[in-house]
Amino acid sequence: MTRVIMHGCNGKMGQTISGLISADPEVELVAGIDARDDGHNPYPVFTEIEKCDVEADCLIDFSAAPAVDKMLDYCVSRKLPCVLCTTGLSEEQLQKVKTSSEQVAILKSANMSLGINLLLKMLKEATAVLAAADFDIEIVEKHHNLKVDAPSGTALALADSINEELDQEYVYTYDRSTRREKRPKKEIGISAVRGGTIVGDHDVIFAGADEVITFSHRAYSKAVFGKGAVQAAKFLAGKPAGMYDMADVIG
């Protein structure tokens, strides 16, 4: 049984993960941490992280960037492994994550979905074959109309996975409207679509002569990210200090 503390337990993802854990016989949610406690959770909730004295095997963080520094200090002081899911961290915070990982196990990934992380792995093998055969590479990502950044972090992670296989020789192109020229060979086009309530769609297109191969991932709810976080917590419990990512979880 993996005992988990949920940091940011009253947020949307915190509540999603609470529900997932309640249905998983291998995991127990023993405490929550949030800025407020409205009393509806079936586990104790602490409004100040340093006052949480519940024994646990791992902490899952889906909070906000300003809360991450104290959370890292807490995990280091208690040698409590942490699945870090909060995004938008500053360069200083990212450095603190790295420093903290020297003392405690931390898992951080651009996308917590098991499917996306399997796709990252599969793309390397596809790239090795298809790029050598002169296939052009394009990425199209679609998200809801409230998303403020473009392209998505996941789209960039997909591009980075491909480019690692290509010795970082390819450049990323986000807009072709200002140029009039043939498509360069060593280019990865990344296009962003924003509309409606799309949770997250990603297509990686390998277009060759007379054939097209497309790798697609569709997220129909944010629960896919919660499921990945729970699997990551099971994996990380008991691990030695260091930086981990979802590639370690899927093997």
Image (tube, rainbow, N blue to C red):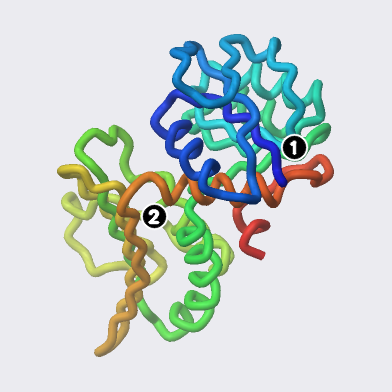
Would residue 191 appear left or right of 229 to someone viewing this image? left
Q: Residue at x 54, y 43 (%)?
A: 21
Where is residue 34 drawn, in percent x and y?
Answer: 52, 17
Residue plotted at (71% across, 34% down) = 98
Inspect the image, locate mark 2, and give the three-letter code of the amino acid beneath it.
Answer: Tyr
Q: Residue at x 76, y 39 (%)?
A: 105
Q: Disc 1 vs disc 2: Cβ atoms closer than 8 Å?
A: no
- Separation of marks 1 and 2 at Cα, in angstroms: 41 Å
Which of these two is toward me, 102 or 4? 4
Answer with left or right where residue 196 lies relative to residue 147: left
Front one among 125 and 185: 125
Q: Position of residue 126 (x, y in %)?
A: 48, 77
Q: Amino acid at mark 1?
A: Asp
- Dot 1, crowdedness within 10 Å: few (<14), some or many (≥20)? many
Outermost residue, bottom direction? Answer: 210
Q: Residue at x 30, y 56 (%)?
A: 201
Q: Nearer the viewer, residue 119 or 227?
A: 227
Residue annotated with mark 1: 57
Mark number, residue 172: 2
Up-down relation of residue 179 to residue 133 (above or below): above
